[in-house]
Image (cartoon, rainbow, N blue to C red):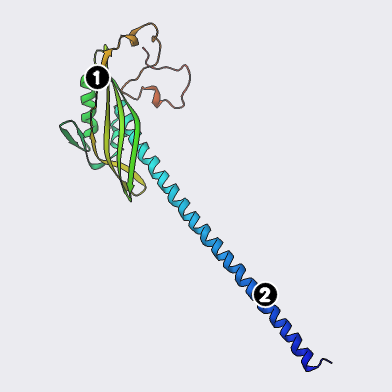
Amino acid sequence: MQTGEALAAQINMITGGVIVLIIALAGLFTLLWVHLARRRAEIEALHRDVAFQKDRQQILDCIMREARGRDRQDVVISASCYWPEGFDEHGPVITPLPDFPERANWGHGKFFSATMHNIATHTCEIDGDTAHCETYVIGGLLSADQQTMTLAPGRYFDRLEKRGEEWRILYRRCTVEMSLQGSAEWVHSPAVKGFLRSVWSKEDVSYQRPIKVGSDGVRW
């Protein structure tokens, strides 16, 4: 039978062990909480980064899609890049949506037989659901008689808005910075004969699904 002193010593030893265990567990839980807090911060930062990159890609896709819509004279594609109450400023002319796609197509069709708006340097500032972008563009313009080619570098200044999950242009302004004009006779030479060429209709090869090598298409 244990004496009082021995029992007390045993109790003290057990109590001390429990205290040490509690301290160890508290330290472990503290480390775990710190780790989880860091992980949560990392996940939140990753979420912000992914959301930012998604917005940036959607904005650039919108600007790229608008260029394709105009080069294909596709009113549906062009209109899908602007909000219905938007405006486009080309030179002294400010055109409201939804009139702009048709008007732009009419202007291009009056003076040119083909256009290519090549999107280049692009910068973008995003503030919430509003973005302001500067985009360089090199316009390739083939005259109506297909004899002259004009290169016209310029810039777009776009204000875009995000509504729901979609970015579209609200306002666009543009510049013409310089130009270069020359003969387009090369496209009529034997070196180009048989190459596919663009058309302003759904007959353009870019609409073909699935794309097939050697299939029909308008050619030089």
**What amino acid is labelled 1 in the image?**
Phe
Q: Secondary structure at mark 2?
A: helix
Please tell me which residue lies in front, 199 or 59: 59
Q: Secondary structure at mark 1?
A: strand
Decide: marks 1, 2 in contact (CB < 8 A)?
no
* Disc 1 target residue: 112
Image height check: is 199 above or below 174?
Answer: above
> Where residue 72 sits in the image (x, y, percent)?
32, 26
Q: Going 52% across and 59% down the picture, which residue do you hit?
A: 38
Q: Is residue 178 visible?
A: yes
Left/right placement of residue 64 relative to residue 103 reads: right
**What amino acid is labelled 2 in the image?**
Leu
Please tell me which residue lies in front, 159 or 9: 9
Which part of the image, by quadrant, shows the N terminus?
bottom right
In which quarter of the view is residue 103 placed? Answer: top left
In which quarter of the view is residue 83 placed? Answer: top left
* Disc 2 target residue: 21
> Where residue 89 sits in the image (x, y, percent)?
20, 35
Looking at the rendered structure, which numbered label has been put on residue 182?
none
Q: Going 18% across and 35% down the picture, which residue do you hit?
A: 95
Q: Is residue 72 visible?
A: no
> Where residue 181 sits in the image (x, y, percent)?
25, 16
Crowd band around label 1 with a 10 angstrom C-alpha radius: few (<14), some (14–19), many (20+) = some
Q: What separation in Å lies between label 1 and label 2 (alpha carbons)?
A: 84 Å
> Where residue 211 sits in the image (x, y, percent)?
46, 24
Which part of the image, by quadrant, shows the C terminus?
top left
Left/right placement of residue 71 relative to residue 195 reads: left
Q: Earlier in the sequence, mark 1 or mark 2?
A: 2
Q: Going 36% across and 22% down the picture, which residue do you hit?
A: 204
| Residue projecting furthest to the left | 92
Q: Going 28% across and 36% down the picture, which residue do you hit?
A: 79
